[in-house]
Image (cartoon, rainbow, N blue to C red):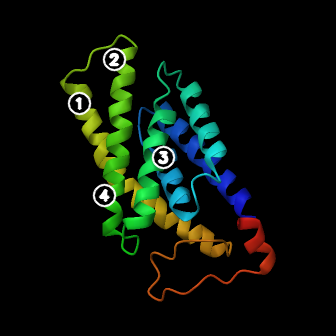
Amino acid sequence: MFWLWLIFCLLCSCLLEVLLGLHSIALPVLLSVVFYFSCLLPWRKGILLYFLAAALLDSWFARTLPSTGLSLIGILYFAGFWQRFGDMNSLFSLLVPGALTGLISSVLLLLNILFSGGRIGVTTLFFSSLYCLAAIVLLPAVWWLLEKGARLLALRRQEVFSTALRPEEYSAREEAVDD
C-alpha cells in the first residue's frame, strides 16, 4: 500500500506541476514530494521512481538540460543529510529545506536557459527569486498535506505535526513490505 501511495503522490505532483506550468506558474512540487519521501525512507528505495517522474517532467517541458533530474540529485543528498541532522519536528524548521530546494532548482533552471541560448536578465532573476520564495512556503505545505494523507491511510509517516509523537502501529506484513 505504501508503494501505491508513493506512486500516486509522484504522479499527482507531476500532473500538478504540468498544469501549473501550462498557466505559467512554476513551482517545484515534485521536488518537494521527493524530499518528503526521501526523508521518510532511505532514498535508495524509491530512486527509480523519483528519476522516472523527473524524466517525465523534463521531457514534458522539453528542457535541453534535464534540470529536474539534476536537481533531484542535490535534493536526495540534502534529504539524507536532513534526515540525520535536521529537525523535522516543527513547521518552521522545514523552511530551510524549502529554501534549498528552490535554490537548487532555480539555479538549474537558469542553467537550462543559458544552455538553450537564452539570456538571463533582471526579470528572469526576479522570477527566479519568486520561485525560491514559493518553494520556501511550498515544502512545509506539501509535507503537511502528505502527513495528513498518510495518517488517513494509516501508512508510514513522520508524525511531524502531531502533539503526541507516538511510534507507528504496523502489522507484521506492512513492516515487511516497507522494509
Which amino acid does the dot numbered 1 rest on? Leu
User: Nearer the N terminus, badge 2 or badge 1?
Assistant: 2
Question: Residue 173 location, x and y as percent?
Answer: 81, 75
Q: Secondary structure at mark 4?
A: helix
State if disc 3 and disc 4 touch (CB < 8 Å). no
Pair 4/1: label in front:
4
* Residue behind mark 1: 125
Which residue is nearer to you in this view: 120 or 69? 69
Q: Secondary structure at mark 1?
A: helix
Q: In this rendering, would 25 be left or right of 96?
A: right
Give me the residue at 51% from left, 64% from top.
Answer: 145
Q: Quadrant of the N terminus?
A: bottom right
- How far is disc 4 from disc 1 in space, using C-alphas? 20 Å
- How far is disc 2 from disc 4 in space, using C-alphas? 27 Å
Which amino acid does the dot numbered 4 rest on? Val
State if disc 1 and disc 3 touch (CB < 8 Å). no
Residue 114, label in figure: 2
Q: Secondary structure at mark 3?
A: helix
* Residue behind mark 3: 31
User: Nearer the N terminus, badge 2 or badge 4?
Assistant: 4
Residue 104 placement: quadrant: top left
Give me the residue at 47% from left, 63% from top.
Answer: 143
- How far is disc 3 from disc 1 in space, using C-alphas? 20 Å
